[in-house]
Image (cartoon, helix red, strand yellow):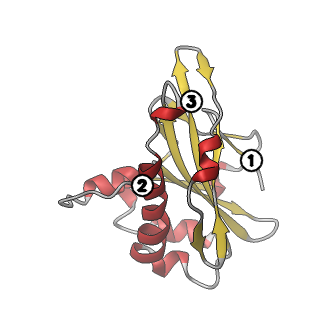
Amino acid sequence: MELINRLKTEPTLMPFIVPTCEDEGICVEFEKGIDKSAILIVKMDDFYNSLGLKETPPSVDCLIVQYCLENNFYKIHLVELKNQERAALINHKNIEGKFETALYDFLSDKFRHIFFDVVFEIRPRLILSAGKVQANSIKAYSLDFLLGLKMFRFQNRTLAIHGYPPQPLIKSC
């Protein structure tokens, strides 16, 4: 859990470590039995908004780091949450920009000293959770447009954005 401990003690991230990943009425849920002490959630969007930049880059809502003890690796979930009436209302270029910022600025530049440390094996996953959330119901719809979005290269891996209905579930390792 060394990676999680390093992130917890990173002064610039401390204010953005939160107990849940939630935005636009959508909250990421965790499978029963997951050790919550092996999870760290950073509100990446809040981090970028706090920088006071002339032009704030688009960024995903949350970074969820999950330590997998059995195999000694870390799942890195980059999560964007969208509460939209229809998939057509989601700006495709903006979604690509959010994941670009997460991968190439946040992980590869600002916190390279942590995420590129050779002692950590990380397995990133890009997640867009979208649908319309109302009172007690969820309208899920197809996210086929994700197939047309660009693929990302990160640490010798090719990554695609995976779509899920609202209330995505983070599974155990």
Q: Residue furthest left?
A: 54
Q: Residue at x 43, y 43 (%)?
A: 91
Circle 1 residue:
171
Q: Residue at x 75, y 71 (%)?
A: 72
Q: Is residue 50 visible?
A: yes
Q: Residue furthest bottom?
A: 118
- Badge 2 element: helix
Residue 35's label in the rendered image is none
Circle 2 residue:
44
Q: Is residue 104 above or below residue 148?
A: below
Q: Is residue 167 above or below residue 93?
A: above
Q: Quadrant of residue 31?
A: top right
Q: Residue at x 41, y 50 (%)?
A: 94
- Badge 3 element: strand
Q: CA distance from mark 3 to mark 2?
A: 21 Å
Rendering coords of residue 97 (x, y %): 42, 57
